[in-house]
C-alpha cells in the first residue's frame, strides 16, 4: 500500500471516529437553550482567551527553540514559530501529521529530520508529565468532588479496557517484537543496508531527544513548559468565566477541566472534535449540576475559539514560510 492510500484510509477512519463522537456529544442538545446561552456569553472573556492562547503558542515556540538550539545554533525563533503554527493547522485536519510537517520545515544540514523529531518526542514526554501533574494537583485539592467522577468516568472505563489478559498478552508480544527488531538492527547494521539506515535514524532520534541534556538555559526550558500549561489552565478559566451559569467556578475547577480536556485530546480524531466536547460537557454536568447544553456550550466555545486562533496564525505563518522560500 502506497503512502497516499495509507493517508486517505487514516484520514477517513479518524474523520468517521470524530463524526461518531460529535454525534454522542451533541445528541439530545436543546438547541434553543444552547443559543440562548451563547447570546449571554461575556465576550470580553473570549477576547482575553485569545490573548492567553496566543501566549501559550509563544511559550511553546520558546521551548522548542531551546531544545533545537544546541543542535543547530543558527536556527531562528521566527522560523520555529512559523513551523509550529503550520504544524498545528495540519493537525486539525489529520492528527499527528503536523509533527512531521514542522520537522520538515526546520530540517537543515545541521538539523536532520530525525533529530528534529527526537526533540518533538522529548516535548511530548514533558507534556504527558505536565498533564499528570495537573490531574494529581486538581485531585489533591478537591478530591471529594473530583475523585469519584474521575474514578467512575475515566479510570474505571480505562482500566476495564486495558485490564483483560488478552490486552496484556498483546502488549508483551509487542514489546518482545520491538526488542527483537532493535537487537537485529544494531546486530546486523554493518551487513544489511536497511538496518544501517534504521540505525542511523534511531541515532538521530536519540540525539534530538537527548538535546534536553545539552540545554544552554535549562530553567528557561522548565519555565516555558510551566508557562504553556499555565496558559492552558487560564484558557479554560476564561471559558467558564465567559458563561454566566459557570461564573462561580474557580481556578481549581479550571485546573481539573483542563486536565480532563487534555486527556480527551489523546483520542486520535481531527482537532480533538467530539471527544473533548463530550468529556468536558460530562464533567461540567456531573460535577456542577449544570445542564448538558451549558457544558456543550463551554466545550464548544473553548475548542472552537482555539481552532480559530490556530487557523489564523497558521495561515499567516504558512504565507510567511512560502515568502521566505521564494526569497
Image (cartoon, rainbow, N blue to C red):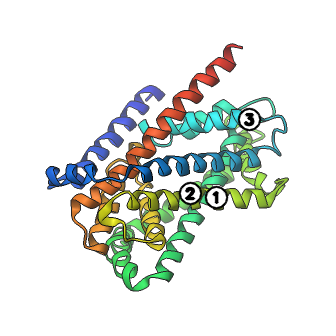
Q: Are marks 1 and 3 in contact (CB under 8 Å)?
A: no
Q: Quadrant of residue 257?
A: bottom left
Tell me the SS state at disc 2: helix
Q: Quadrant of residue 14?
A: top left
Q: Residues within 10 Å of mark 3 (few under 14, many from 20)?
A: many
* Residue drawn at point x = 49 percent, y = 33 percent: 312
Name the image quarter holding the N terminus. Answer: top left
How far across and how far down the image is residue 131, in percent? 53, 65
Disc nearer the start of the sequence (1/3): 3
Identify residue for label 2: 231
The one nearer the camera, 246 or 218, is 246
How far across and how far down the image is residue 135, in percent? 50, 72
Numbered mark located on residue 227 in the image? 1
Tell me the SS state at disc 1: helix
Q: Residues within 10 Å of mark 2 (few under 14, many from 20)?
A: many
Q: Is residue 81 above or below residue 202?
A: above
Query: In the picture provided, is 70 more to the left or to the right than 53?
Result: right
Numbered mark located on residue 245 in the image? none
Identify residue for label 3: 112
Q: Is residue 182 above or below residue 151?
A: above
Q: Are marks 1 and 2 in contact (CB under 8 Å)?
A: yes
Q: Is residue 76 above or below residue 151?
A: above
Task: Using the numbered discs, state the Cα–Cα distance from disc 2 to disc 3 in whole angstroms.
Answer: 31 Å
Can residue 185 be seen by looking at this rendering?
A: no
Amino acid at each position: 500500500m502506497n503512502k497516499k492510500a495509507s493517508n486517505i484510509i487514516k484520514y477517513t477512519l479518524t474523520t468517521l471516529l470524530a463524526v461518531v463522537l460529535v454525534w454522542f456529544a451533541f445528541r439530545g442538545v436543546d438547541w434553543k437553550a444552547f443559543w440562548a446561552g451563547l447570546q449571554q456569553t461575556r465576550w470580553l472573556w473570549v477576547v482575553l482567551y485569545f490573548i492567553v492562547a496566543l501566549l501559550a503558542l509563544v511559550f511553546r515556540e520558546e521551548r522548542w527553540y531551546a531544545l533545537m538550539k544546541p543542535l543547530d545554533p543558527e536556527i531562528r525563533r521566527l522560523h520555529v514559530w512559523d513551523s509550529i503554527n503550520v504544524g498545528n493547522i495540519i493537525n486539525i485536519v489529520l492528527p499527528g501529521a503536523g509533527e512531521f510537517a514542522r520537522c520538515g520545515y526546520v530540517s537543515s544540514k545541521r538539523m536532520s529530520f530525525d533529530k528534529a523529531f527526537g526533540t518533538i518526542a522529548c516535548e511530548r514526554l514533558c507534556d504527558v508529565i505536565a498533564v499528570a501533574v495537573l490531574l494529581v494537583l486538581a485531585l489533591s485539592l478537591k478530591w471529594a468532588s473530583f475523585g469519584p467522577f474521575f474514578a467512575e468516568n475515566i479510570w474505571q472505563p480505562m482500566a476495564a479496557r486495558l485490564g483483560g489478559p488478552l490486552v496484556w498478552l498483546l502488549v508483551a508480544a509487542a514489546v518482545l517484537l520491538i526488542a527483537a527488531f532493535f537487537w537485529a538492527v544494531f546486530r546486523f547494521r554493518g551487513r544489511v543496508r536497511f538496518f544501517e539506515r534504521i540505525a542511523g535514524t534511531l541515532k538521530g532520534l536519540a540525539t534530538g531527544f537527548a538535546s534536553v541534556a545539552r540545554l544552554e538555559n535549562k530553567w528557561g526550558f522548565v519555565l516555558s513548559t510551566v508557562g504553556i500549561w499555565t496558559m492552558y489552565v487560564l484558557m479554560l478559566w476564561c471559558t467558564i468565566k465567559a458563561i454566566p451559569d459557570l461564573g462561580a467556578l474557580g481556578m481549581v475547577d479550571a485546573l481539573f477541566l483542563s486536565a480532563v480536556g487534555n486527556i480527551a485530546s489523546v483520542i486520535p480524531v481531527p482537532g480533538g472534535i467530539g471527544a473533548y466536547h463530550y468529556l468536558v460537557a460530562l464533567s461540567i454536568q456531573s460535577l456542577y449540576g449544570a445542564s448538558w447544553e451549558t457544558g456543550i456550550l463551554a466545550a464548544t466555545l473553548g475548542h472552537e475559539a482555539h481552532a480559530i486562533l490556530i487557523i489564523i496564525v497558521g495561515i499567516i505563518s504558512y504565507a510567511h514560510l512560502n515568502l521566505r522560500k521564494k526569497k
